[in-house]
Amino acid sequence: MSLLRRLPQVSSLLESKEAASLAKSHGRELVTEAVRGVLDGLRAQIKSGENGVSEDALAAPAILARAAAVLEGASRPGLRRVINATGIILHTGLGRAVLPKAALDALVAENKGYNLLEVDRETAERAHRERHCAKLLERVTGAPAATVVNNNAAATMLCLAALAAGKEVIVSRGQLVEIGGAFRVPDVMKQSGCRMVEVGTTNKTRIADYEKAITPDTALLMRVHRSNFAVVGFVEEPSLEELVGLAKKRNLRVLDDIGSGALLDVARYGITPEPMVAASVAQGADLSCISGDKLLGGPQAGIIAGSTEAVALCRRHPLFRAVRPDKLQLVALEATLRLYLNPDTVEDTVPTLRMMKMPLAEIEKRAKAMAKALHAEVWDEESQIGGGSTPGQNLKTKVVAVDPGAKGADAVIVALRLGEPPVFARVQKGRVLLDPRTMQDGEDDEAVAAMKAALGR
Ligand SMILES: *Cc1c(COP(=O)(O)O)cnc(C)c1O
């Protein structure tokens, strides 16, 4: 019991000079809480009879130092940078697309004070907040009009509500997809106030199926891209051109939910082509929707491109105000879109594209350097594009394969996640793998240090 009695009083600790200086940065309340927490911890440790509570640990300076460390840890951002060593380029859990440097710079520079969000500086009149992005989108997609909302789920809902609320929307049974969470096409239709009319089968839907389902109540034909899975074998579905042809003949509109939304043909990276917005627009879809943070490689956003008249219907719909993007998204999206104006550099300036394009030789060189520092091996593996795009299609990569020793791979993975900075890696055949492809500039050294700490070396 003598150890317990030696613990200083909270009040005397708080009166110290060290506590006063901590209170200046963290506030009195948090300092009191931290000091109490450290004292409670020591008390519990002493009572449980654990050894290792030294006399020094009970002295005021040691207690205040521990409280300072607790405060320091708690004041770090919860939503913080992590090292993605999983090799999944669009990792939804880790924030999807890595923002281009131009977007990061613009986020700070254009948001330091006020900005031109909704004022036209020539006339001083109110203007649409997404007008700058829209102009760039019209240019890169070839669409006569475009607008931006908070994300693509919102874009899809808004388009359905604006073009077909209270009416019938025809969609193939092969496209009744779930994108993730509660985003399932049948539910989205219902929430948008549309009546879904399913046609065809899971694997085969023909243009005649759509044609037969048209009634006086039909407003829209919808196509949904199967972003996150593939149907192969005995399959058939009409092309977008056929849908547009039918819609024109019957005075209907066509909505194309593309999702992944490549602005650049990803076939160049050796994977199956993803549908491109420009093609969808050129083939005559009234509206095409894509995500800002999938293959486009920008911030979270929902992009709607299409005819002037259909885009105007979206802008005028009451839902539009509820799903509008904020100025941070718009500044980052504008900066990202601007990078696409230079096709010679866009694959270097947009990290998502850079990671897809990264030569195997460069990955191998980095893997070898890390493997050397960690006494690990280099293995052939595959990186994934991820993020609800290019299902089942992987890119060849080289990974660092670390032997976790007696500690075991699962324990090392946890230690990596809880380290500073947190590192996300994967386990294969008992080894902990680091894929350089998704690690950003300067993160190789950080990951090596984090791995050494996690291994206890
Ligand atoms: C990803 C995706 C969505 C949802 O987009 P978010 O930007 O994640 O809201 C909708 N439809 C399709 C086809 C998608 O691939």
Image (cartoon, grey):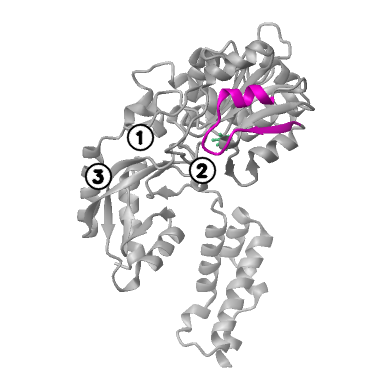
What number of labels is visible? 3
Which quadrant of the view contains residue 23?
Answer: bottom right
Which quadrant of the view contains residue 195?
Answer: top right
SS at circle 1:
helix
Q: Is residue 422 left or right of residue 168?
A: left
SS at circle 3:
helix
Identify the image quadrant of the C terminus.
bottom left
Q: Earlier in the sequence, mark 3 or mark 2?
A: 2
In the depicted view, which residue is nearer to us: 382 or 17? 382
Which residue was labeled with disc 1? 356
Crowd band around label 1 with a 10 angstrom C-alpha radius: few (<14), some (14–19), many (20+): many
Q: Earlier in the sequence, mark 3 or mark 1?
A: 1
User: Is residue 210 inside the magenta stretch?
Assistant: yes
Which residue was labeled with disc 3? 366
The stretch of residues the image draws in magenta is: 194-213
Q: Is mark 1 within 8 Å of ligand 1?
A: no
Above or below residue 163? Residue 402 is: below
* Residue 151 visible in rendering: no
Q: At x 38% / y 56%, what residue is drawn?
A: 426
Crowd band around label 2 with a 10 angstrom C-alpha radius: few (<14), some (14–19), many (20+): some
Tell me which image quadrant ligand 1 sits in: top right
Residue that sits furthest to the top in the current view: 123
Q: Position of residue 95 (x, y in %)?
A: 51, 43
Above or below residue 275? Residue 126 is: above
Query: Disc 3 marks which amino acid?
Result: Arg
In the depicted view, which residue is nearer to us: 81 or 96? 96
Q: At x 55% / y 49%, what residue is drawn?
A: 79
* Residue 321 visible in rendering: yes
